[in-house]
Image: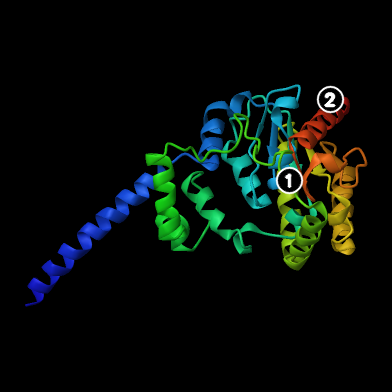
Amino acid sequence: MMSRFIIRLLSFLLPVLLMGFLSELALRKIPNDYSYKKDYLDKNSGNIKLLFLGNSHSYYDLDPQYFSVPAFSAAYISQSLFFDYRILTKYDGRWDRLETIVVTATYAGLFNNLESSVEAWRTKNYIIYYGFLSSNKVKDYFEIFSNNYEFNKLRLKSYYLDNVSPVTCSELGWGTEYKSAIKNDLIDAGNVAATRHSANADVAHFSINKLVINDMIKFAADRNINVVLLTTPAYHAYTDNINKHQMQLTISMLEEMDAINENVIYVNSLNDKDFIENDFYDADHLNEIGAKKLSLKLDSIINNWK
């Protein structure tokens, strides 16, 4: 009786497990921005002279094509400093020509952490595509468990049947989706973003992120690499509504790092008046027009600093 039950159970489970395995495999074979960046770094890390790290403020605001040396953006949406450091150290020994690292250090990024945020689902991408073992949650190791069935079905259909690539970044890793043709309400966007970033701010994360930045600076100094700490421009509807004390903590900490480390410069563009309404996609991100402007300005700063 028991053996018959086991046979029936296996006859039911095996097709389910096989379908799950094939679905997982098919989902992992769909290209994405994470796999693209990892593959690019695998092949080209030795040729990069300027590397961008950070969250969406780096991903959308800095376009590598406008810099005077070979550059690449390993930044991404909601990417925490913890993963910036993991990417940097993953390719240790392979940064043959790397001269400068640009790390976006913003109000939103320094007081937050990816794993405990509403964007925590993105953690699985660093585990699956970069190979970082950094979660104790089983679902973070599988595509089929990290998203619901309907979303995964849509992904499979879009890529395998409709031939639509989900890769959205440029060849050099820049985020291409925040276009000037899309007109957003900057006042409303500023209020919403400032409220969200302030509500989710955690001083404990700030202390941890400060340590991570110090580790990155030491890593760079030991290898004769310069570090640019960058606070990107924001529209007044955002800067007027963020927590002023927390913003000052951020600026003071970054200015201190500039003062005590020879290989570090802090560039604070938060209230740069050169950036006007037409440069912004929303209140704390630039569109392609603003990204070109910031990229050219930062390229000049880096060249003059050297």
Judge depth for marks 1 and 2 and give the one in front: 1
Is residue 208 toward the left or the right of residue 256 in the image? left
> Which circle's residue, 1 or 2, is located before the other in the chain?
1
Secondary structure under badge 1? helix
Q: Position of residue 122 (x, y in %)?
A: 56, 54
Q: For mark 2, does the 10 Å Cα neighbourhood hold few (<14), some (14 to 19), or many (20 or more) residues?
A: few
In the rendered view, tell whether residue 192 sits above or below residue 26: below
Secondary structure under badge 2? helix
Q: Quadrant of residue 40?
A: top right
Identify residue for label 2: 303
Disc 1 vs disc 2: Cβ atoms closer than 8 Å? no
Is residue 118 toward the left or the right of residue 255 in the image? left
Question: Quadrant of the image for the N terminus?
Answer: bottom left
In the rendered view, tell whether residue 18 sits above or below residue 49: below
Q: Amino acid at mark 2?
A: Asn
Q: Nearer the viewer, residue 272 or 100?
A: 272
Identify residue for label 1: 57
